[in-house]
Image (spheres, helix red, strand yellow):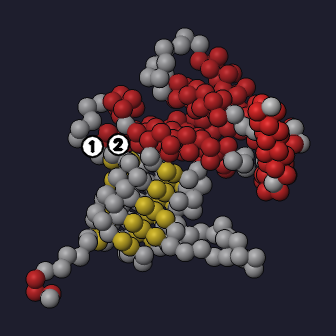
Amino acid sequence: METNDSEHAVLLETERLLRYSLSDTICTPMKEGRISPNLPRLKQLVDLVKEIVFPGYYSEPKSESRASLAELNGLLKEQIAHGLRFFAEQAEGKTEADAPELALAFMRRLFDVKRMLYTDVKAMFGNDPAARSYGEVILCYPSIQAMIHYRIAHELLRLGIPVIPRIITELAHSAIGIDIHPGAQIGEFFSIDHGTGVVIGETCIIGSHVHLYQGVTLGARSFTFDERGHPLNVPRHPVIEDNVVIYSNSTILGRITIGHDSVIGGNVWLTHSVPPQSRIIQYRASSNDS
């Protein structure tokens, strides 16, 4: 008798869950038979790029790199097709039939991804006296892991592939605590020291030879809303010009510009633009101010 009551209660709860209208909206792609991008397969995709870009560091050296490239191309076609189908409303007219062409377009950009990542490794090595070799940076530094994910995701986003770029950067964010939106534009020779807690927003533009320390936030100060009250995706994050250093736990908000060759000290809250070669430090009150 108790068993029957329990089974009946489970059935009632199941019906209640299925009737919940918001779940119907969220789960529409699943009801239409769409297959979502697969997180383990996307992680495998990133790992393959790491093996190709830094041969011998993340796997046993392979005598035939063509096999890795062919495997990467196959994974790209598969996951891009899933992404375009599952997130069709965000695909801007692209369909799963475009997946092979988009995968090939990314493969053609892989050389530039590699070149940019090598400049990042050099910058991180050059900015940290604790680093003993490029290999130490590649294997040990969380910032290079964040940049690998970001550089891959940014190119996929430029190709108009929905959501997958965000998944790839969030894989790094969840693992190492560095949050870089794939839409940010980051120049060459970019480095982050330590890195924990760094946030770089979607519409940030960062020049070359920029160095950040842990806890830096490059965020939005406020949002612009449409007539329905929805936030608009407009430029709202800082522009950081070349050769800028931003020290730990500083927060820079809004569509402001930090001029080239500037230094922003630690724990600074900045919501206005500063000219090139600025030196901005936290104000400290003295006994004479009272």
Residue 94 appears in the picture as rendered: no
**The C terminus lies in which quarter of the figure?**
bottom left
Q: Position of residue 222 (x, y in %)?
A: 55, 75
User: In the image, is 223 to the left or to the right of 178?
Assistant: right
Q: Position of residue 107 (x, y in %)?
A: 66, 33
**Vertical relation: 211 (above or below) 140:** below
**Vertical relation: 16 (above or below) 115:** below
User: In the image, is 219 to the left or to the right of 2?
Assistant: left
Residue 44 appears in the picture as rendered: yes
At a point 23% along the width and 38% down the height, the residue shown is: 130
User: In the image, is 56 to the left or to the right of 85?
Assistant: left
Q: Quadrant of residue 185?
A: bottom right
Of all residues, the one furthest to the right in this rendering is 32
Q: Quadrant of residue 233?
A: bottom right
Q: Between 61 and 248, which is closer to the camera in this rendering? A: 248
Q: Quadrant of residue 229?
A: bottom right
At a point 64% along the width and 34% down the height, the residue shown is: 39
Characterize the local packing of mark 1: few (<14), some (14-19) or many (20 or more) Cα atoms within 10 angstroms. Answer: some
At a point 59% along the width and 18% down the height, the residue shown is: 65
Kind of residue at badge 1: Asp
Of all residues, the one furthest to the left in this rendering is 288
Contact, mark 2 vs mark 1 (Cβ under 8 Å): yes
User: In the image, is 123 to the left or to the right of 130?
Assistant: right
**The N terminus lies in which quarter of the figure?**
top right
Which type of secondary structure does the marked residue at label 2 adopt?
helix
Mark 1 sits on what residue?
128
Q: Which label number is shown at residue 237?
A: none
Mark 2 sits on what residue?
124
Kind of residue at badge 2: Met
At a point 59% along the width and 74% down the height, the residue shown is: 223
Q: Position of residue 69 (x, y in %)?
A: 64, 23
Characterize the local packing of mark 2: few (<14), some (14-19) or many (20 or more) Cα atoms within 10 angstroms. Answer: many
